[in-house]
Amino acid sequence: MPPANRQDSTNNPIQIRLDHRVLFGFLILTSVMNAVVLFIPWKEIMAGKNDFPVFYSSAQMVHEGRASDLYDFDAENRFVHRVSDVTRAPNNHLPYELLIFVPLTFLPFGAAHILWTLISLAMLVGVALMMQDIRPGESSFAVAILTILAFFPVWYCLLQGQDSILLLLFFALSFWFWKRGQDDLAGFVLAVGLFRPQLVLPFAFVAFVAGKWKFLRGFVPGAILVLIASTWVVGLHGMGQYGKVLISQGTQGSASALASQWQVRPGLMATWRGFLWVCLPAWVPSGLRSVLLLSGTFAGLFFAAKKLRAAKDQPSFELALAFVVATVAVVSFHSFLNDFSLLIIPLLIFGRYLGPPNCVPRKSARVILTVGFVFFLTPLYLVMLTTDKVGLFMAVEVAALWLLNRVLGHLSMSELPSHSEEALSVVVA
């Protein structure tokens, strides 16, 4: 038997180092692959076969003084059919967001879509600029922007003409303010992203449970402002119609109606809800589905709040905040793969703290690299999209959260003496 005081070498902490040639080569190759995936269906995109017609047509209704009918299904689709022959599900976004899209209605549909794509790319550059100080160094911006472009959900958002990149920008800006001690402003900025309440409200709930009162002090007036702006756009009647739309889409039982009437398939959601939709047999009662959905959702949110409350210094706060963002993306009730682009924030943050000079247990290092690789595996996303099995990716997300929660307790936040450091390298430079 080995001596009792000998430590298992698999538990010795080591550094994870990626050779820059390998890292940049992989990110560039994946980014090119994602760009190809975007341009292959370009003719269909220009013909309005994606989600952009919803934003463009709804903004046209505001522009032409028909905003009060914005949540009237028939009226909405009469405008949609001007640019697309695909009937759409009822709009479920707060109407204040459309003020951003109204200027695009002065352009033809194709030109407006191209301009929105360019604006989205500019917003990604903004996200990279705000997140680059997570990994200081000469190549920090290059690493940040390439990581963003190598993440397929970002390109899926561009492909769909969705607004998730705008929400990503608000999350990144909120994080940028919060880490600088401007909690009130961080809360206000995130409230401006309430056009996707299924992602913003769970984050605010976690902040409430964690006792982040300064953040909430900024969030509440921001939320009131967007409600006032929305009421100004569509009136009280329109807001009442919006409430009915949310109620009709806001239950687990509504998933079947969405799937059958408007081809809104929960299996395309990389969330806990999508996972249940894919994995549970059809005979499982809707009541049991709702119980599983709610219990899993609140368990994740309360656990994330616990981590945020326990954060006492800057590194632990950044990591806890990243953990909250990842958890919110996992438990969101109504989020598709384009909303999964929000995970670029925790990926960039965790990537910083899992690299030198920090150390992780040897036996976890290769698992971390493998899970990280899966997140950037574009062919896997394409297979899941074509088979309506995106919900299965939730298992990878939960595994990553569990692994990172386990590993973070072993991270050394200070530099180790150089003679005692070991490193796991993909390629030795």
Image: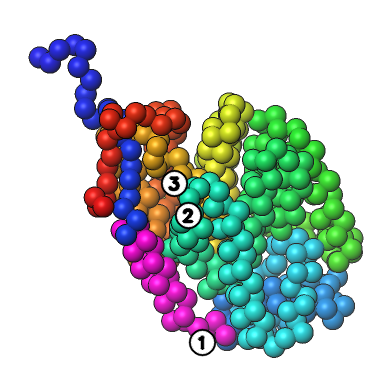
The residue that label 1 is drawn on is: 43
> Badge 3: how crowded within 10 Å, few (<14), some, or many (20+)?
some
Looking at this view, is 29 or 238 the one in front?
29
Residue at 75% x, 64% y: name it.
97
Residue at 55% x, 67% y: name it.
157
Which marked residue is nearer to the observer: mark 1 or mark 2? 2
Q: Is residue 39 magenta?
A: yes
SS at badge 2 = loop
Q: Picture coordinates of residue 208 (x, y %)? A: 70, 34
Looking at this view, is 383 or 22 the one in front?
22
Residue at 77% x, 84% y: name it.
106
Residue segment shown in magenta: 22-46
Q: Magenta region, mostly helix, strand or loop?
A: helix
Amino acid under disc 3: Gly
How much space separates mark 1 and mark 3, taking CA atoms? Answer: 37 Å
Residue at 65% x, 79% y: name it.
115
The residue that label 2 is drawn on is: 138
Amino acid under disc 2: Glu
- Going from N to C along the chain, the mark reached first, 1 or 2, is 1
For residue 309, above or below residue 323:
above
- The label number, if any, that marks residue 351 in the structure image: 3
